[in-house]
Image (cartoon, rainbow, N blue to C red):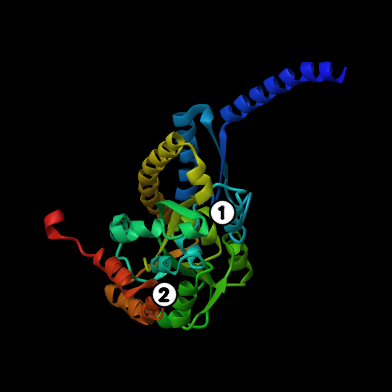
Amino acid sequence: MKKIFKALVLPVALSMAGFMGTAQAQSPVVIKFAHVVADSTPKGKGALLFKQKAEERLGDKVKVEVYSNSSLYGDGQEMDALLSGDVQLLAPSLAKFEHFQKKIQIFDLPFLFEDIDALDRFQQSEAGQSLLKSMEDKNITGLTYWHNGMKQLSANQPLRVPRDARGLRFRVQASNVLEEQFKALRANPRKIAFAEVYQSLQTGVVNGAENPYSNIYSQKMHEVQKYITESNHGLIDYMVITNTKFWNGLDSDVRTALEDVLKEVTVEVNKMAKELNDGDKQNILNAGTTEIITLTPEEREQWREAVQPVWKKFEGEIGADLIQAAVDANKIDANKK
C-alpha cells in the first residue's frame, strides 16, 4: 500500500515542483529603491523615473518599489539595509561614504569645484569613474552619479564674511570633512539626520545649515531661516549604489537593461537638478520669508581662504593626485570649447 501511495504521489510532487520552479523563474525581480528626500527633488524624481523606465523596458521581469522621505529607512539605517539585502538601490549623498572609502571625501572639500560643469568633468573622468567601483570589496557597487546642486549657507542672521559664522551651530551631514569645514570657521557643527533638520532649525537646536535651493524649499527650511548666502561653496551629489552580490547575480540581459536605464535617467536627473534649483530659488524669493545674500568676489574669496586648511588636513586620506585631478577639472581647454 505504501509503495502504491508513493507511486501516485511522486509524479504529482515532481509536477508541482516543476510548476513552482517555472513560476519562481517567471516572478519579477523586486528592486526596493529607498531614499530620504521628497519626491519633488531631483533624487526623488530620478527614483520615480527609474521605476517607470525600468518597468516599461523589462516588463514583468522587474518590479521597482520606491520609498521616499525616509519612509522605509532613514539616514542612519539605509546603508545597513542595503548590505543586508533589505533594499537593492540607494542614492546616498556622497558625504555618507567616508566609512567605506576615504577617497570619496573629495566631494566634500569646500570650494573645490567652481561649478556643476567642473564637477561633471571630474565625475566622468577616469579618476571620477574609478570611485564608483572602489567599494566593491565591501559589497557596494556604484552605478552612477546624480546631481542635486551647489550648496548655499542658511542662518537666522546674515552671513557675508567668515567671522559672521563664528559661534553659530550648523547642521552637517555625517562627514568629518564637513565637520572640519565649520570648525575652520569657528562655528559648531552638529551631525543631524536629514529628516530632523527642519525641526532642529525651528527649535533652535541649530542656527543654520547648508543645502541646495531644492532641499531648502522642498523641506520648507526657508520658513525657519531668515537668510541664505549664495556661497556655492560645495555640493550635494548622490551616488546611486547597489548591493554588489545582488547586482552581479542578476541575469546579464536584465543588468544591461538596467544600466542603460540608469544612463538615461542620469541625464534627466542632472538636467532637472539645475532647473529645479533655479526654480526653487525663485520660489523662496516669492515666499518673502528669506533674504538671499549675493557675495562679492572679494567676500567669496574670504570664505575660500578661511576653509582652505581643510584641504591639507584630508590630503593624506583622499590623495594629492586625486585632489589635483579635481582642481584640473575646473580648467577648460580652449580647443575643446
Where residue 172 appears, x then y in whole percent? 52, 69
Of the numbered discs 1 and 2, the one sitting upstream in the chain is 1
The amino acid sitting under disc 2 is: Glu
Measure the alpha-carbon separation of dots 1 and 2.
28 Å
| Figure quadrant of the C terminus | bottom left
Q: Residue at x 86, y 20 (%)?
A: 2
| Figure quadrant of the N terminus | top right
Residue nearest the viewer, comparing 157 with 52 = 52
Secondary structure category for the residue under label 2: helix
Residue most toward the left? 335
Residue most toward the right? 1
Read off the residue under disc 2. Answer: 317
Residue nearest the viewer, comparing 324 with 275 = 324
Read off the residue under disc 1. Answer: 36
Q: Residue at x 47, y 30 (%)?
A: 58
Secondary structure category for the residue under label 1: loop
Q: Is residue 195 left or right of residue 143?
A: right
Q: Using the image, determine if residue 11 lies above or below residue 42.
A: above
The amino acid sitting under disc 1 is: Val
Where residue 207 appears, x then y in whole percent? 55, 73
Q: Residue at x 41, y 36 (%)?
A: 257
Q: Is residue 39 visible?
A: no
Q: Is residue 123 visible?
A: yes
